[in-house]
Structures are given as structure tokens and as C-alpha cells.
Image (cartoon, grey):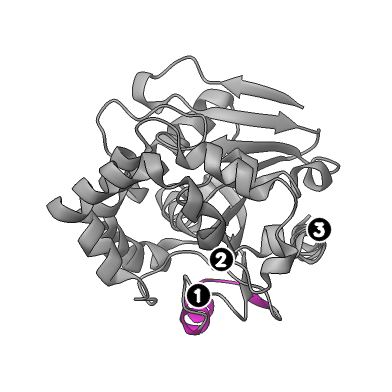
Amino acid sequence: MRNGKDQRGGETNLHYVQAGSGPPMVLLHGLLGGSFCWRLNLPVFSGRFTTYAVDLPGFGQCDAPADGDCGMQAQALRLLSWLKRQGLERVDVVATSWGGGVALLLAALSPTSVRSLVLAAPVNPWSQWGMRRVRFVGGSLGAALLRLGMPLSRPLHSTALKRMYGDPRKIPAGTVEGYSRMALRKGLARNIVATLRSWENDLKALRTAVERVQSPTLLIWGTRDGAVDLRSAETLRKKLPACELAIVEGAGHLPFEETPEEFNRLTLEFLGNRA
């Protein structure tokens, strides 16, 4: 396993963790996440794939983009440029939440680049949960409060993470500390605000992009997801080609962490059937 950083392309520089050998697989984190999120999946996936757990610009260990745009559409374009520079012509993409939205936009931008998609509760236009918070934090007052509060937020990290789990007792050791390190990284509040200010335009783009996605897709959703509405999964399933939906009973928004064995099994079975 090794850490890598694309040294070319200015604002499109990406940090990533690479492991394994075989066909290429790219792992995309959610908002507030990074390559750290895939620590329970990377060792398994790398047994069959050359696996790249990416930190998108502005998150994880990756510096903010030069243009300040952290929105989903901008990230999809950067990711496509990175794939081309790495010589990765056809990849399987496993993504979660906000990263799932980026993955869908990538697949619409370049259908030949994405062999298949595995998406854990991807952000999508048919789930309106949290839109009031998005608009507030993306506004001037909310942005100012976030910038002031983020450096002091450590005591809240455990509570926030528990809300992402169906059963907080399943939070793996070291998880709160890992997310805290990412949350307290300098400049993160600015990057979150930049992301949320693009949110509604990105959702509009996703609504039309989904119609252009050609990649076979597996959706994985927890029944206790409190971040992205499970009811939106059925709409996505109908709109995406060759799309399957797997429901993880009792899991929250992070099934790849909360139930990693089941998530890994579902992912590898799906991708194995596409081989």
C-alpha cells in the first residue's frame, strides 16, 4: 500500500492511497470524508483490484483547488483529468454520499471511463433531506458561523458520527479520531461552504446527468439512513440502466463502515458478475 500525489495539473492535484493489483477501482468519499473512510474496505478490494482511495481537492489530505470550486461538477471534471493522466481508461467506481453524486456526474461525462458503479446512498435530486441546512450554511451567516465553530467542534464529532450510524455501538475503534483529524484540517470550513454553494446547481446537473449514465450500477442503502432518503433509491434504480438495489437492514448512512463485511461482499459479488 502506498500514498500517491499527482504532481501535475495544478488545481487538479489529487492525493490517493493505492493498493493491490488487477483491474483499476476508484473509491470516492463523502463530504467531510477522505481516503481514511475506506480503511475497512481497501484491504479486501485490493485483493482483486488495483485500488485507488482518492482524496478529492479540498478534503482529506488534498489541498483546496486553486479556483475554490469544490462542487460536484468541478470534482467530476478533475477526477476525469486525473484518470487520463494516470492512464486509467476503464475503472470501477465505489462511492458514497456526496462522492456518489460525483461518481454519477463522472459516468455521465465519460461513459467509456466507468465500467460500473457501486454507490452507497448517493446524493441525488430526489432526496430533499437537509436542503434547509445546505442553504443556511451556504449563506453568509451560516458560512461565518461554520468558520468560527469548526476549530472548536471536536466535542461534537462523536455525537455527529453517531447520527450517521444505525447502531452507534458499531462505530469501529479509531473512527471518531480519524474523522476529527479531517474535520479540524485548516481551511475545511471554507471548502465545505464552497461545496454547499454549488449544491443546488449540482443537483440540477445530476437530474439530467443520470439519464446519460450507461454503467451498470449497484445501489447500497441502509434502512436507518438519516442523511439521504431511502425512498429516493427506487427513483434512481428506475432511471439507471442495469441497476440493482441492495438494502442493508439496520444500517445508517455509512454501511461501508458500519457493516463492512456485508458491504464488501455485495460489492465484490456485483463486480464479479460483470467480469
Element type at mark 2: loop
**Above or below 54: residue 220:** below
Residue under the point 63% across and 75% down? 222
Residue under the point 80% across and 66% down? 262
Element type at mark 1: loop
Residue 234 painted magenta? yes
Determine the CA span between mark 2 and mark 1: 7 Å
Q: Nearer the viewer, residue 22 or 231?
A: 231
Residue for badge 2 = 164
The tag on residue 272 is 3
How crowded pointer 1 is (Cα within 10 Å; few <14, some 14-19, many 20+) is rated as some
Q: Answer with left or right where residue 148 lies relative to residue 90.
A: left
Q: Is residue 92 visible?
A: no
Q: Nearer the viewer, residue 183 or 206?
A: 183
Start and end of the magenta stretch?
A: 231-247
Contact flag, marks 2 and 1 (Cβ < 8 Å): yes
Q: Position of residue 43 (x, y in %)?
A: 81, 42
The tag on residue 235 is none
Q: Nearer the viewer, mark 3 or mark 2?
A: 2
**Residue type highlighted by circle 1:** Gly
Residue for badge 1 = 226
Residue 42 painted magenta? no
Give the position of the N terminus as an image quadrant.
top right
The image quarter containing residue 13 is top left
Q: Position of residue 141 (x, y in %)?
A: 15, 54
**Residue type highlighted by circle 2:** Met
How crowded pointer 3 is (Cα within 10 Å; few <14, some 14-19, many 20+) is rated as few
- Farthest top residue? 7
